[in-house]
Amino acid sequence: MFHMGWFIGRGFSVQAWNQPWSGTIGVDYMQPDIYIDLVRAMERASFDYLMIEDGSFMPDAYQGTPDWYMRNAYGVPKHDPMPLVPLLAQGSSHLGIIATMTTGFYPPYLAARLGATLDHLTKGRIGLNLVTAHNDRTAQNFGLEQHYEHDLRYEIADEWVQVVDQLWQSWPPDAVVADPETGVYADYRKVHPIDFKGKYFKSRGPLNMPPGPQRRPVICQAGISPAGREFASKHADTIVARARGVESCKRYRDDVRARMVKHGRNPDDCKLMFTITVVLGETMEEAKAKKERANAALFTDLDTRLAQLSFLSAVDFSKFPLDEPLAEVKTNASRGLTQLMTSGTGKSTLREMITDPSSGGLDFVGTPDSVAAEMGEIAQEMGGDGFMITEGVTRRAIAEITDGLAPALKRRGLIPTGYQHKLFRDNLLAF
Ligand SMILES: Cc1cc2nc3c(=O)[nH]c(=O)nc-3n(C[C@H](O)[C@H](O)[C@H](O)COP(=O)(O)O)c2cc1C
């Protein structure tokens, strides 16, 4: 059996803007309705969690202006996912809900307090996707000229997690008495300051509220570089990973598991979820035709992938010649993803790279039953923990995945038919 999740790669934004089947998304994406439809459907499908991407900058790398990004609603608008979390929790009862938070610019005390508050509100179903933020534009919104050097960001993140963890631990489980007989709510002698003094952060503590049912929200990480993997192997309960093909997935997983052992952790305590795309049809021919149409569009719309690469790397990809060999692109932004989508394609010129039909992860095409069978075989082969759907959120995609693919996976016994536990982490670690 494996775990399943859905990664909303666009964040709390205009989902699948200007795509067929996206309804009135341009004017109502900021309401919770479509996300509530999604979590209800995911729960019916017995999926483990939803993960919402986030970032705090106006992208402008492609052609040096925000024009392409604003016209195409890519990376902007982007609303804060945190207030959406309790609304989604009200619309579900067992699904894990992970929202992205940056260790680069979120003060640890506020982060610990927000995480604990959301853990209470969701009754133990919150997770935090900890990212270091990758763009100078983000750094400039928080008072820096440019972002910290790539690996230094992870060093800072490492200390950030230590502070936040200590704050969550500053109230031991028996500190809250809540006994009306004695009139004592909490025993002050048990709650202690943390007096954290590190290289990057200081915090006195304690937290001014007790931690939630999970005590420590589920920690998620989504990074590719060695520094990112090292960070994840120390702290994460789950990793959303992108790797090209089964062999790369295997290598990624072996690497993270070895790093976890080095840090004294049981490698089964972190669930590695690989991103996938799924093109479904009622027949194989229909699914293949759909995929071919999408592949053909890559040749007529070069802008989209060029702008996406510029978004990830903060380098203007409109400046490179399309038909000459592309040298390795150096970036202080998202190094792992930039490499994956350029030299990682194994192609030589930029045009070949951006018209490569692969998503950079695992791609499936077929009927619900044939895709379920293939996912089962791949999971067996790589020994992986699970998969993350990355489809743009439309109600059609929700139905195809949760009412088409998920029942086929259940019929084959590949995913569970319900939830064993109340808390997110317990369900994640159940198998
Ligand atoms: C599947 C996936 C999801 C990601 N989601 C986010 C996100 O929500 N916000 C963000 O700033 N970066 C996100 N990233 C980027 C990474 O977290 C990281 O910031 C970036 O890849 C730079 O680190 P790296 O060089 O270690 O890969 C994501 C990466 C992957 C592979």
Image (cartoon, grey):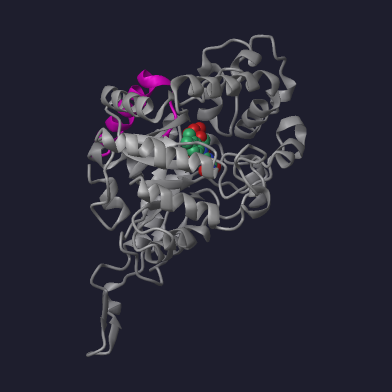
Quarter placement of the C terminus: top left
* Image coords of residue 266 (percent x, y): 22, 39
Would residue 426 be visible to someone looking at this image?
yes
The region drawn magenta spans: 241-264
Q: Is residue 326 above or below residue 312?
A: above
* Image coords of residue 421 (percent x, y): 25, 55
Q: Is residue 385 above or below residue 338?
A: below
Q: Is residue 366 above or below residue 50?
A: above
Q: Nearer the viewer, residue 419 or 262?
A: 419
Would residue 2 be visible to someone looking at this image?
no
Please name the residue shown 50% across and 39% down the image.
397
Q: Nearer the viewer, residue 370 or 358?
A: 370
> What's the magenta bit mostly, secondary-structure-wise?
helix
Residue 191 relative to residue 77: left or right: left
Quarter placement of the N terminus: top left
* Residue 243 highlighted magenta (yes or no): yes
* Residue 323 highlighted magenta (yes or no): no
